Structure formats: structure tokens, C-alpha cells
Image: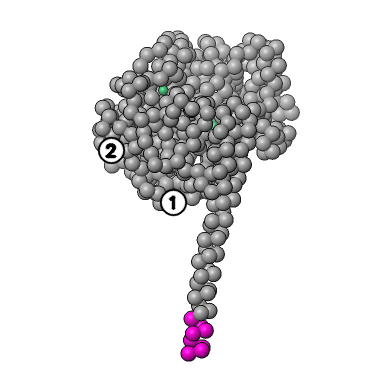
Amino acid sequence: MERIGPAHPAERIPGWGSDADVTNRPGIPFPDVPHQRPGAHFDERAIPQQVTTVEVLRPPERAGGPTPVFGTANPPRGMSGRVKHLAYRYPDHLTRRWMLLLLSHRLDVLEARLERAVMPGVALTVAAGCLILLRRMWTTA
Amino acid sequence: MLAVSYEGPNRVTVTRKPDPEIQHPYDAIVRVTRTAICGSDLHLLHGLIADTRVGCTFGHEFCGVVEEVGPGVRTLAPGDRVVVPFNISCGVCFFCQRGLYANCANTNISSDLASGVYGYSHTTGGFEGGQAEYVRVPFADVGPLKIPDDMDDEEVLFLSDIFPTGYQGAEMAGIRGGDTVVVFGAGPVGLFAMTSAWLLGAERVIAVDHLDYRLEFARRYAKVETVNFADSDDIVMDLRDWTDGRGPDCVIDAVGMEAEGSKLQRVLGRMKLQAGATTALTWTIQTVRKGGTVSIVGVYGPPFNLLPIGTAMNKGLTLRMNQCNVRRYMPHLLEHIRKGHVNAKGIITHRLPLTEAPRAYDLFAKKKDDCIKCVLVPHTTH
Ligand SMILES: NC(=O)c1ccc[n+]([C@@H]2O[C@H](COP(=O)([O-])OP(=O)(O)OC[C@H]3O[C@@H](n4cnc5c(N)ncnc54)[C@H](O)[C@@H]3O)[C@@H](O)[C@H]2O)c1
Ligand SMILES: [Zn+2]
Ligand SMILES: [Zn+2]
């Protein structure tokens, strides 16, 4: 182990102990005395609801309604999407939910790889087909 | 715009995506000037966080310039420079009212575990991240902090996550004057936990890791004592011996679910028999003195992990943990940076253009080229 020389930290560390007094610590008390946070100029019940055309999955813990804002990245798709549908039927304290999400992730990765592999494959086949056809036409003409 | 895109475990690329749009009256769009890669992003990269979807954009540490605001935004205007906390929080719900920004009830549609987080899988709400040229910022009046004119982006960038996270880690550890503190993990979060432990008045701070270059950096940057657990037959016994035989008063886990040091733990983690390895966390519980406090800032996933809870119970420990309530700490820590107590940007070892994100991930994930922290530059400020 590497030890540091004998000098007290106050002598070698700038700002040492400046928050030693707990009243100088921004996270205390934890939880804080309830109050509206700076910048929040609205009432919770009056927050407008985000709307979207994208499919967003909502688990039972959100049965009361969607949160006023949410992300719309990467809507569920393909087989992995179907498994996600199933996963989000279960609340987050059930292991089932997480195991299904794990499965859907593996499927998602597989589907994306297949797409990458298949798309050039399809393009190549079409191109080769056209070439063969052209050659036929050329040689029979 | 250009954005980082997740392509499955261990693979990210940079692709073109549509620019983000205002989707809610309280939204802003921010043009990103600096964004960093975090240890938390590595958990995503390695496919360890549930419902991380192929094609999503990571990035929850960023600052930039407000490009556009929704009709309900009052305190921000286009042109304002801002640093944005990683938590997306409403500021008015039961949890936000109590300062628990990380537990906001109004921003995570996909689970009740935590608030929404930028670029952090659908488990935290399915929001796009900041490792992109532009990003959508919901509740723009609540989260972002305006950057003072006399400070540059990199000085304040880490107020978005790791400095507050390290500080909260030290604060939750309940450090009092004269305490001995052990920090597991000498990564960016660990380094800020160490510097924060000094601010709170710790008498001794000891860093534990197995990467010599990081321990060397910790000695220089955070002026702490260090120990490499790979050189120790029994790190728990050694740490106790070095702390009057009793064990340290406070121990901080700044490692998380990808801890090294136990083959059994790694295997169980890989096989998904638990949500990642709890090696470091187990050591914190075993090392801390009886009646001491363990503070957990390393990230662990649901649904469960192996933990010596009986040891914690019999030793009468206090366990504290959370995702960081970043916004609560930003103004206070900004002052520490301004006063020169903490040189936050001093941990940056690599700066790369956004287009080189895959290389930056490789450097940081594999701990190459003495990497401590990578910053990506999508746009320059002026
Ligand atoms: N709570 C929060 O809000 C929050 C915020 C940011 C990051 N985090 C988490 O903090 C953790 C650290 O983040 P980082 O950016 O510093 O990551 P990092 O990967 O750079 O650092 C982790 C360090 O831990 C070391 N390590 C591995 N096993 C160890 C062990 N058994 N004992 C001691 N050290 C060990 C590694 O060598 C590495 O240096 C991650 O889990 C990250 O997700 C939490
Ligand atoms: Zn982070
Ligand atoms: Zn809230």
C-alpha cells in the first residue's frame, strides 16, 4: 500500500473540511423538507400530457396512465417487440419481466444482425439475377 | 444529425438520425458541445441493462447550447449555455419535492424503479441520449443549469453526473471529521468520491482498484493512499489491518456490477444468475467497521444480486444508496470548482470527435492508453 506523508490533510488538500458542517451539505436532510423545486413553475396536476403516434409500452405500475413525458426512441418491432409486449404485462418486482426483457434483447440483436446480413444478401441476389438475365438476352440476341 | 447508435453487445457506431423535435411544451432542444462516456454506459455497452434496444443513442453526461424551447419554457432561451443533469425530473412530484430527483414519478413510463434518464435504455424511460449533435431535454426549466459566462464547458461538464455522484456517495457515507474512508474503484466516479471525502473532512482516504495506472492517477489527482487488490491475498484483512484493526468508518462502492476480483461472481453474473457481479459490494460490507456506513453509487441491475446481508445485519451497518439526485448538488459543486477546490476537468484524458465514438468506447471499456475519462466533441461552442 502507498501511504501519504505525515502532513494533516488540511495542509495539503485545498478546500479540506469546507463541508464538514452538515448544514453545508446539499443532500441533507435526505429526503429533504418537501417543496417545489427551483424552476418548476407549474402544478403537478396541470402538467400537459405528451402525445405520440409511436408505440410506447406501459407496464402495470403505470396502469393509471402514461407519464406526462416519455421517450419515443426505438418502438418495439419484430419478434423481440412481441416478447417485450409480453414482458411489460408484468410489474417490475417480478423476475419474469426482466427475464423476458433479457430474451427480447437477444432477439433484437439477432434480428438486427440478420437484417444487416440479409439486406446485402437480397441486393446481391437481385443484382446477380439481373446480370444473368442480361447475359441471356445478350447471347440469345 | 449524427448520433451514437447501439448495435448489440460491445458494438456502437455513429449513424445519421432525424434531428430531435419538441414533443412537449416544457421541452428544449440542446445543441451538444461536449458529452462524456460514463462507466454506466459500459453496462449498456455490455448488454447488462434490461431493455437496451438496438439503434438507441447513449449519453447522459452533456452540455451545450439551447437551440429551441417549447411554448411552456420560461427560464431558458435559445443561445443559453447549459449543463444538463442525467436525471429527467419534473420538480413537483412527491419525490422531486423531497429532493429525490433520481426517483421522479413523472418521467419514466417504463418502470417505477427510477426517474427517466437520457440515453439509458427503456428501463429508464426510452429517452434518446446526448452522444449526438442534438438532444431533446424535457422539463427544461427544472433540470438544466445555466453555465456562468466565465466558465468553459469542460469545467462544468461533470456537474451532469460524476462529480455530484461522487459527492453524494461521500455524503451518504456519513463522513465526519476524523473518519477513515475507503473508496472501491478508482474510475471517474471513485475519483470524485475521494475528492469529496476530503471536502467533508475525512482524515484518511484509501483507494482500492487493480489498475496501477488508475491508482497512480488517484495518488496524484486526489492525494489519497492506494492499494492494488490484485497484489493482496486478502484485501478485506489487509484493509482492516491498515485501519487500526477495526476497519474503516465509511466505505464507498464506486465500482458497480462489472467488478473484477472473483471468478465465481463473474461467472454467476455472466450466466445471469444474478444481475452482475457484487464482488466490490461484498468487500465493502466485509471491510467496514462494525456500526459503520456503506454507501453504494456503483450501479446494479434488477432483479437480484448475491449479497452477504447477514454480515451487514450482524455488524450493525448502515447501507445508503441511490442514483444521484444530480440537480440538488449542481450549484454547490459549481462553487467548489470555481474556488479551485476541485479541478473537475483534470480527469479528462481523451478528447475525440463524435465520429470517433467507437474508438472512445474501446479505449474506456478496455482501459487502454491510461484512459480515465473520454469526452466527445459533436460541436464546438463558439
Ligand atoms: N449512482 C449513480 O448515479 C451513478 C452515476 C454514475 C456512475 N455510476 C456507476 O459508478 C460506477 C463507476 O463508474 P466509473 O465511470 O467510475 O466506471 P469505471 O469503469 O471507469 O471505473 C470502475 C473502476 O472499478 C475498478 N474495479 C473493478 N473491480 C473492482 C473491485 N472489485 N474493487 C475495486 N475496484 C474495482 C475498475 O478497475 C475501474 O477502475 C459504475 O457502476 C457506474 O454505473 C453511478
Ligand atoms: Zn454517468
Ligand atoms: Zn418529479
Magenta segment includes A138: yes
Q: Chain of mark 2?
A: B
Q: Chain of mark 1?
A: B
Q: Position of residue B60 (x, y in %)?
A: 44, 35
Q: Viewer-proximal residue, A68 or B74?
A: A68
* Residue at which label 2 appears: B68
Could you say which quadrant of the image residue B133 lies in?
A: top left
User: Seen from this angle, which residue lies furthest bottom?
Assistant: A141
Numbered badge on residue B298: none
Mark 1 burial class by Cα count in 10 Å: few <14, some 14-19, many 20+: some
Q: Provide the secondary structure element on which disc 2 rests.
A: strand
Same subunit: marks 1 and 2 = yes
Q: Position of residue A16 (x, y in %)?
A: 46, 17
Q: Position of residue B129 (x, y in %)?
A: 43, 39
Residue A84 visible, this angle: yes
Residue drawn at x 61%, y 28% as measured from the top left: A94
Instruction: Give the Cα distance between marks 1 and 2.
Output: 23 Å
Numbered badge on residue B15: 1
Q: Provide the secondary structure element on which disc 1 rests.
A: strand
Which stretch appears magenta? A134-141
Q: Viewer-proximal residue, B364 or B89?
A: B89
Colour scheme in use: one colour
Could you say which quadrant of the image residue A32 lies in?
A: top left
